[in-house]
Image (tube, rainbow, N blue to C red):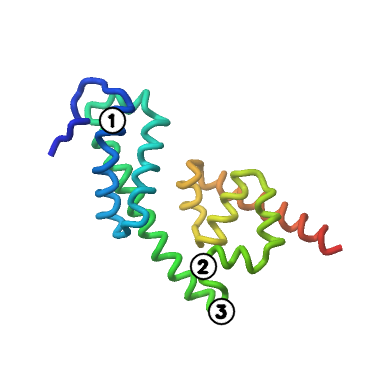
Amino acid sequence: MATVTDNPQVISFEAFYRTEYGPMVALATAVGGNPAVGEDIAQEALIRAHKNWAKICSYERPGTWLRRTTINLALNVRRGSRRQGAAIQRLGSRPANPVEIILSDPAVWQAVAALPVRQRAAVALHYLEDRSIDEIAGILECSPNTAKAHLHHGRQSLASHLKENQQ
């Protein structure tokens, strides 16, 4: 079924957003299975569209691009929830909630907060969400080698910082 935004004429991002936001929330909720995050997923998909609007608005069907992105984000969230559940089971007695994990060792997470943004994100994705290097690369929109480097440098900085604070 074609949508209003699949009209080949170029439309403004504002008009695109107004037309597509509601349907994207519904789509993200249906695909992701979680109404609580449907709005977040729709917002993220629209943010990505806005960042690339100069290119996307020239597509014959920009609404199709947005739907594909929304579906992919919703599936990623769903997969992440399953992986998080598996990671929590593996952790056993460790706190189940990522916020509890952070609160359980505030010195470590304060050190993480001091890292450069990409290193901080890689460390958080790896340790809080049990994400693989490939997943981290996808989220950070970089190559797996770059994601691995961010994680490696983040670990090195943390080790150095925590070692200094123990002395």
Residue located at (51% from left, 41% from top) = 142
Nearer the observer, disc 2 or disc 3?
A: 2
Q: Give the residue pinned by disc 3.
A: 93
Residue 54 horizontal/vertical position (percent): 37, 23
Label 1 belongs to which residue? 16
- Quarter of the figure that contains the C terminus: bottom right
Give the residue number, with chain letter if any, for mark 2. Answer: 97
For marks 2 and 3, give the CA distance.
12 Å
Residue at the top extreme, as displayed: 9
Q: Nearer the viewer, mark 1 or mark 3?
A: 1
Q: Secondary structure at mark 1?
A: helix
| Amino acid at circle 3 | Ser
Report x, y in % for residue 49: 36, 34
The residues bearing labels 2 and 1 have C-alpha atoms spaced at a distance of 37 Å
Give residue 117's position: percent from left, percent from top.
Answer: 61, 44
Q: Of marks 2 and 1, which one's residue comes earlier in the chain?
A: 1
Secondary structure of the residue carrying tag 3 is loop
Give how far apart the Cα atoms at labels 1 and 3 are: 47 Å
> Where on the picture, by quarter, is residue 20?
top left
Q: Quadrant of residue 47?
A: top left
Q: Residue at x 50, y 75 (%)?
A: 90
Residue at left offset 26%, top offset 42%: 22
> Mark 1 and 3 residues: CB-CB less than 8 Å, in contact?
no
